Amino acid sequence: NPMNNRYDRFSQLEKDANRFPIGIHIAVRNQLKLAAFLTALQAMAKTSAPNLLTWTTNEWKGMTYVVVAPTQEAGNGFNLRLFYLPAAEGLTLTVNETVMKNAIDRLIAKRAATTAGKPVPDQRPWLGEQMAAFIQPNFLVQLNELDNRGRLSDWMDNRVNNDIAILNEWHRLFPKEDPVTVHQRLWNTTLTCPFGGTYRWNEATLSMESSVFGAANEDYKGPVTPAALAAIASINAGIAFEELPNLITAQPDPNDRNNRRPGEPTTIGLRVRLEIEPATLGINPVIPIIPIP
């Protein structure tokens, strides 16, 4: 029953919510305003929703972070907790305590390196000033496991089943030819198994099958890692907005009160940078830089 499956997956997500390896760091310029905001937020929560949340503190390597959790009465089995660390460098938030401890370790190492005048250890450059992201493919696999082997597994299973169905039809119509070759000739597309295997004919079952997944509609229990991600070690991306040089500046219009000041640039550029680190040695990284006016 699809509805039961969705309910089971949502229930599993409720139980595993604090396993999500996700963290957010927000840089701040004024620490006093950050302190005032967090204090006001806590006061508002206690006033508008009393007895629903608890605010406690934990300590890791001399640094204190805050834990926001539902009370036993309000939680009703939902154990999601929010961890946040206000610091001079900014505000760090996460739902995973291990992520918070790792963030504190990096912050301590960064402060020690800065004090000693040494480069920050293992510091990856952020590629965008306005938005940046660093992703490793196993992150998607971890999310899929937390989703009780949900959407990613469903997509890969459906892909294999659909491929096997059409390949079986090609085998019926062209019994003397390889079904994969027939499909490539007719549709100019080569069917590839998303699990990284190959499609082959099984004389015992009289059906095509995947060398990894098996026959159609089998209950696959192996690791779920799309083969397309196997060649990628990491993806680093960033977005930055910048003024484009050598453009015609705006001219004041006496009839328009809202027009720009003289000499103000009229166009802002969007610069997107993407770095892909290959997992296989001998492949050069692809680093396209795309300015979009």
Image (cartoon, rainbow, N blue to C red):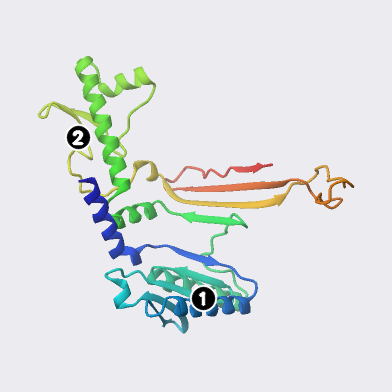
Residue extending furthest toward the left: 204
Q: Residue at position x 29%, y 50% from top?
A: 150
Identify the residue under disc 1.
41
Name the mark nearer the viewer: 1 or 2. Answer: 1
| Residue 281: percent from left, percent from top | 44, 46
Identify the residue under disc 2.
216
| Residue 127: percent from left, percent from top | 59, 54
Displayed quadrant of residue 131: bottom right
Q: Residue at position x 37%, y 75% from top?
A: 69
Residue extending furthest toward the right: 254
Looking at the image, is 231 positioned above or below residue 21? above
Q: Nearer the viewer, residue 136 or 164?
A: 164
| Residue 246: percent from left, percent from top | 81, 44
Q: Determine whether the residue tagged by mark 1 lies in a helix, strand or loop.
A: helix
Looking at the picture, which amino acid does disc 2 mark?
A: Ala
Is any atom of residue 195 visible in this view? no
